[in-house]
Amino acid sequence: MEQKIEKATVMAANDLISYAEGGIVSKEFIHSKAGSITLFAFDAGQKLSEHTAPYDALVQVIDGEAEIMIAGKLYHPKAGQMLIIPQNALHAVNAAQRFKMMLTMIRG
């Protein structure tokens, strides 16, 4: 069930975004000069090709299991686990199965 993201309210991140068959859904809920926090829901088979970011990125998996390649090494964070993608590291995201994640990027 999709919910409006409101400040000063207790919410369950997993309930704030829904899967879309054959797609990737994203919902940015904080954006400032300092950085952003975005929820993603990847359907099985979806991916983000290799790219870099000019700052560290914290991935928190909130449902399922992700496949994240960082600088040639494959990681499989599961729900409840997190992983930091280093600044300027070549990385890609793959959904061998459906998963949801929260991405926090802080500009430094």
Image: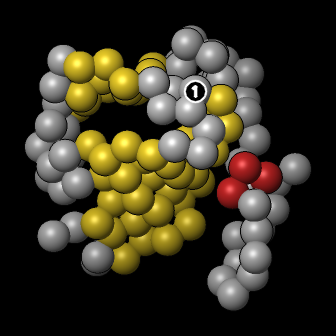
User: Which quarter of the figure has residue 75?
Assistant: top left
Q: In the image, 80: left or right of 70?
A: right
Is 37 situated above or below 60?
Answer: below
Note whether residue 49 is visible: no
The type of colouring in the image is secondary structure
* Count of marks overlaid on the render: 1
Residue at the far right: name it.
1
Is 51 situated above or below 108?
Answer: above
| Three-letter amino acid code at the position of disc 1 | Glu
Note whether residue 44 is visible: yes
- What is the x, y in percent for residue 26? 57, 46
Residue at mark 1: 65
- What is the x, y in percent for residue 7? 66, 83
Q: In the image, 6: left or right of 100?
A: right
Q: In the image, 75: left or right of 34?
A: right
- What is the x, y in percent for residue 11? 76, 68
Is 101 situated above or below 103?
Answer: above
Residue under the point 62% across and 38% down = 79
Residue under the point 18% across and 18% down = 72
Viewer-proximal residue, 4 or 102? 102
Q: In the image, 19: left or right of 30?
A: right
Residue under the point 53% across and 20% down = 95
Residue at the far front: name it.
81
Mark 1 closeness class: few <14, some 14–19, many ≥20 residues within 10 Å: many
- What is the x, y in percent for residue 56? 23, 54
Residue under the point 45% across and 46% down = 82
Quadrant of the snapshot with the C terminus: bottom left
Where disc 1 sits, the SS reads: loop
